[in-house]
Amino acid sequence: MLNSVGRRGFEGEALRAIAFPLGGIGTGTVSLGGRGNLQDWEILNHPAKGRDLPFTFFALWFQPAGEPAGARVMEGRIPPPYREAHGISPGRLGGLPRFRAARFAGEYPFAWLDLEDPAVPLRPRLRAWNPMIPMDADASGIPCALFDWRIQNPSNTAVDFAIAMNVMNPSGWDGAQPLDSRHAAFLGANRNEAREAGGLRGVQMSSDRLSPGEAAFGSLAISTTWTETQIRSQWRRGAWFDDLQAFWDDFRADGRLDAVEDAGPSPDGQTDVAALITHARLEPGESVEIPFALTWSFPNLFNTWNTESSVAGKALGNYYARRFPDAWTAAEFLARERAELERVSAAFHDALFTSTLPEAILDAASANLGAIRSTTCTRTGDGRFNAFEGCGDAAGCCPMNCTHVWNYAQSVAFLYPELERTVRETDFGHNTDAAGKMAFRTLLPLVEERWAYRPAADGQMGSILRLYREWRICGDMDFLMRLWPRAKAALEFAWSPANSDGWDADRDGVMEGIQHNTYDIEFVGPNTMCGAWYLAALRAGAAMADALGEHDAAEAYRALAQSGALGYGATWNGEYFDQTVAFNAETQAGRLTPHGGSAPVDEGEPRYQYGAGCLADQMAGQWFARCVGLGHVLPEDRVKSSLAAILRHNFRATLENHESCQRTYALNDEAGLLLCTWPRGGRPRFPFPYADEIWSGVEYHVAAHLIYEGFADEGVRLVKAARARFDGVHRNPWDECECGHHYARSLSSWSLVLAWSGYRYSAPEASIGFDPVAPGDFRCFFTAGEAWGVYERRGGRQWLRVLWGRLALRRWWGVAGEIAFNGAAIDARPQAGDLVLAHPVTLAAGDTLVLEGMPTAAQSGA
């Protein structure tokens, strides 16, 4: 049973922008709209924002004892404006009665919809969800959307009722072409088959016309385990509006549909609508829950985004289809496993949402988990995780695995580390050549050809940091040894003669050369935006080299990081780090590549730099270093000063007077953090693209960094400002856009959880620790290695309880005291400010460590 229901509720105008994604990792999604409508049918292997499946809805029939019957579409009312030239199409059921009031609440992966109408004697509540279990990518990758309708009878009269789940067979539709009825040229020979097996009842929808290798080939199913269920594989076919008229008249009369003779596959140019109708009776005060499932399998993912002949149009496949070759297989699996999947998903939900984290942090971190389930992310047939930067309305944006954008994402690494490790396998096992040059985008399928563009300085250095993060999370030395040779080459590429961009050609720890980066341009000259990634990568490289016995290399990397930290002092202006634009037009102008057709040089000076600007991203690499326990790679006092300057100069409480000729993600009286400002003057005529924009993914990493450095209130204020823009009126709370919907950079929001809890974990050291920002009682969800659970602090005690998986521990970081394992005292001794167990313990689900003690010192993570 869920312990909390809808901390953040929406109603009225705030329902308009809501689209809550339902689906598994790499399966595509269907979104639940704020009114209860199903929208954005993105299960056909590409985005489909704004595309609805006609005649797909839940309907309620009801009849109080001795009174007339009634019926409603189980949605809130369709709001204005009504701009359609021919009115609202019958496929959207605009003329049928709905509920007068709707209220929506969401705590990912669960959403709740409450419907109310004075003319309806029942109170319906929908819980929509799909399994989400950290550390279990397979359980979290089921192609389904689950709908549990809880119907309550608050009246003093018995009420008979029926719920009809109606879904149109989409076979032949690509999800992109307009579709507002049962009739379209690309439809035809669609087959709806009634199925009953082992208490499961439903309909599988497919096509007799499509062959197994075609892009549109696949199936969709609706099912329920409710006993009293009427199955109708197809509505009565008719011309004009006869099909909907026949359904509504029949259903409204008695909550049932007359038998329709199975007429076989649909005629050319047509498809059919299937219906499941469940029946029940409620006495006064009673309630009942009726489950429905929507499942699908569309196995044929193709590369439709690249033009390179080696990969364009090539088959990639979907991993989930290996497990569920058709939709009914998924439905049967859910019928068997649904109770356990619900139990563990609810346990995750409760562990996360009973945290005492600030509400804004919990909201940002949880809501953006939807991006992992969106069409931004795929899991191709080989099982590897691959992702766009974001997804457009009808196609993915900026393929694939862009290193300089995914640098910011933390959620996948900490919740699904097995998936994140597959990306490191791609980065270093495929995309990095022997000289250390890394392609910052991935061509799929993996072929000999690599992405043919200059390497990204921030993305390449960040990938080394991410390898370090993955190793700390899993502790697998074989994984590290396998990838280390190319990772080492990628790190040393910074000063290699093979690097034509000359990042650190003089090997002094400072990048002076041409540095392609996440703004899709090249910075030239020393700057900490790329430089902090470099310094942190050197520190991470040293730690990995030491672990592999390469101590000379480790010492050289540490010395270079120290030299660079001093060298970047040249970019310190006494308040924050800026950029020293060092450019030799004669030798380098020809090596800058225009982006978007713009000239890269103006009168011998490089265009698209930031110079004296205060850049929000100036210490992104330093933020990442804090997330993985590397401490300060730049001087601590300057880090704190720069963060204060970013907040002081770049945060706008209102954007009413802000001028931007770029893309607009915040406006009017909204608040936000600008990417760059020039408080000391010196703004270039043409600064780097995006300088005047606001990116929520950057706001979150700056906020987390503020928290790490002791500016907790300021960090929370920044998160609140960002999340206030996603209020259901102006934007969807479960979709943060940048270059596309569900943008990957927003997954930096998980670092807010890490920062506020003071979490640090190392599988190689079998150590864990927490240093919560707020004093007093504290509780939060955590992941570690192959386990997750809850950490709690009350009084002089600390609890670590594992709820899923197994966690081996030897050291509790930053504490002293007596420790017990499942109530029995165990031997431990203080060592270097930590508590070291005499013998390692392994916690399984239900096991608890209890510490009677206090922190040994301020736990800064340095």
Image: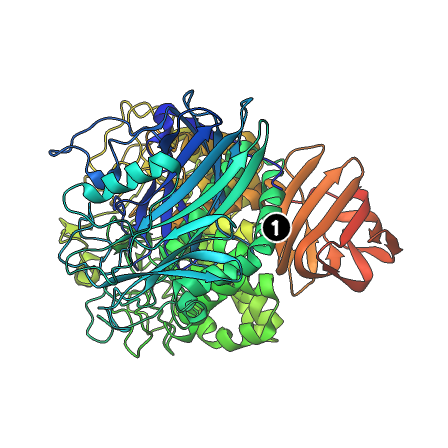
How far across and down, in percent of the image, does residue 214 sit?
A: 24, 70
Q: How is the image coloured?
A: rainbow
Q: Is residue 510 above or below residue 100?
A: below
Q: Is residue 593 above or below residue 492?
A: above
Evaluate whether residue 75 shows in this view: yes
Q: Is residue 169 above or below residue 88?
A: below
Nearer-the-camera pick, 318 or 483: 318
Tell me which residue sits at (62%, 71%) in the image. 547
Q: Residues within 10 Å of mark 1 (few under 14, many from 20)?
A: some
Nearer-the-camera pick, 709 or 426: 426
Evaluate whether residue 747 shows in this view: no
Total marks drawn? 1
In which quadrant of the rendered view does residue 12 lie?
A: top left
In which quadrant of the rendered view does residue 533 lie?
A: bottom left
How far across and down, in percent of the image, does residue 652 sit?
A: 37, 27
Residue at the disc numbered 1: 343
Instruction: Name the outermost residue toward the front.
Output: 66
Q: Hey, what amino acid is under mark 1? A: Arg
Tell me which residue sits at (27%, 47%) in the image. 53
Tell me which residue sits at (28%, 66%) in the image. 217
How far across and down, in percent of the image, does residue 329 sit?
A: 45, 65
Left or right relative to 683: residue 772: right
